[in-house]
Amino acid sequence: MTTTNPKFAASAPTLGLAAAVADDQPWVICLCAEWCSTCREYRALFARLAGEYRQFNFAWVDIEDHADLADDFAVETFPTLLIASQSGTHFLGPLLPRAEALARLLRPLQPARPASPAAQVLLAALRQKPEDFRLDHSNSIIT
């Protein structure tokens, strides 16, 4: 199961989905697996942080459902987080599944370094079909 930021829910076209996807707003992408209990527990916290940090796009990418996009990241530890934008990769690595750990990364977002080819492919897929990566199961906006 894969999901995105609350602004990419079913009603997203009314929220300017195309503009949101086309900008250089950083993406905070959790690379996870549905079978992983840690990922399942982290999902609600990740969704809550998406509501608090609206200056970022958030996506939940199941590495098995989207192996074509995620295999090049060689995820070995869950959850693994990718923070990337058109400017490049800001962070890629495992992250403790705690709100403060992610908040510490987002507050002083580091300048981007050139995005890897794998990050470029994943960002292109997110921009092309953001609705495939909703954060919630109900297709409604998380507030």
Image: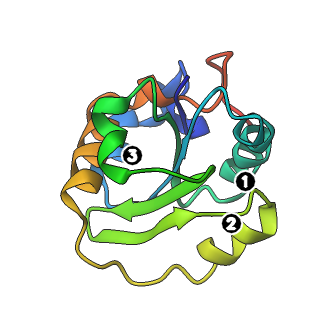
Is the Cβ of the residue at disc 1 closer than 8 Å to that at disc 2?
A: yes
Tag 2's secondary structure?
A: helix
Please give the label number shown on residue 49: 1
Quarter of the image with the C terminus is top right
Q: Relative to 110, does residue 141 appear above or below in the rendering? A: above
Q: For the residues carrying marks 2 and 3, which lies nearer the camera in this image?
A: 2
Is the Cβ of the residue at disc 1 closer than 8 Å to that at disc 3?
A: no
The residue identified by callout 3 is 20
Tell me the CA gap for discs 1 and 2: 8 Å
Q: Earlier in the sequence, mark 1 or mark 3?
A: 3
Please state the horizontal and vertical placement of residue 50, each as a whole percent of the image. 66, 50
**Which amino acid type is shown beneath numbered disc 2?**
Leu
Compared across the picture, whether 7 is left or right of 119 comes to: right
Is the Cβ of the residue at disc 2 closer than 8 Å to that at disc 3?
A: no
Task: Identify the colour scheme used.
Answer: rainbow
The residue identified by callout 2 is 102
Name which residue lies at 61% across and 18% down.
139
Tell me the CA gap for discs 2 and 3: 22 Å
Please state the horizontal and vertical placement of residue 86, each as a whole percent of the image. 26, 62
Q: Relative to 105, does residue 36 appear above or below in the rendering? A: above
